[in-house]
Image (tube, grey):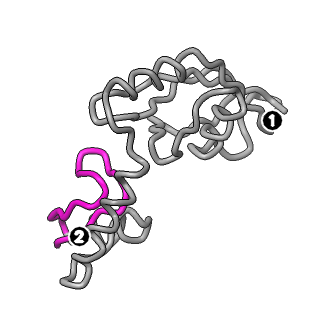
Amino acid sequence: MKIILTHEVSGLGTAGEVVDVKDGYARNYLVPRGFAIRWTKGGEKDVEQIRRGRKIREIATIEQANEIKGRLESVKVLLSTRAGDAGRLFGSVTPADIATAIKASGGPDVDKRRIELGSPIKTLGAHQVSVRLHAEVAAKVGVEVVAA
């Protein structure tokens, strides 16, 4: 099935690309989560609009991405959330929470869609989070989750 990606999907492509995927993957995962739309002839017009929007949000050069990476890695991110007695969180930490905490800690403004969590953060303590700034540049950010 042909689809048009509306967001960057790891291992598949970036926003505005037309890709072929298995029907079930598109129908059950990509389209319901808003990562893609079905390809149509009318949808081809949307591709250019998606690409323009991506170009505005995108970090233009590797030098700029490396500069932001340096700022991100130097920031101490402290995230306060509700937790039980055993150190387990009520829920989990989302990429939106991390983006807000980075901004509150004095770091650069980061799009939540660029934050990649290996697995959901459900415990207190120190965790490593990857932020994909450019196709070739990723920053490792240390996030300290503490009980509120």
Q: In front: mark 1 or mark 2?
A: 2
Image: 120 above or below 78: below
The residue tagged with tag 2: helix, strand or loop?
strand
Q: Is residue 7 within the magenta segment? A: yes
How far apart are the alpha carbons under marks 1 and 2? 43 Å
State the count of labels: 2
Q: Nearer the viewer, residue 142 or 134?
A: 134
Q: Name the residue: 44% across, 34% down.
A: 118
Q: Which residue is mark 1?
A: 84
Does residue 127 appear left or right of residue 17 in this picture? right
On the image, which quarter does residue 15 sit in? bottom left
Residue 87 x %, y %: 74, 28
Image: 102 above or below 53: above
Does residue 26 appear left or right of residue 64 in this picture? left
Image: 94 above or below 126: below
On the image, which quarter does residue 7 sit in? bottom left
Q: Name the residue: 80% across, 35% down.
A: 84
Q: Name the residue: 33% across, 68% down.
A: 49
Magenta stretch, residue numbers: 1-22
- The tag earlier along the polypeptide, 1 or 2, is 2
Q: Is residue 130 within the magenta segment? A: no
Image: 122 above or below 126: below
On the image, which quarter does residue 131 sit in? top left
Mark 2 Cα shell of 10 Å, populated few (<14), some (14-19), many (≥20): many
Mark 1 Cα shell of 10 Å, populated few (<14), some (14-19), many (≥20): few
Look at the image and tell me in which quarter the C terminus lies.
top right
Q: Are marks 1 and 2 in contact (CB under 8 Å)?
A: no
Residue 129 x %, y %: 50, 29
Q: Which residue is mark 2?
A: 3
Task: Identify the amino acid type marked 2.
Answer: Ile
Look at the image and tell me in which quarter the N terminus lies.
bottom left
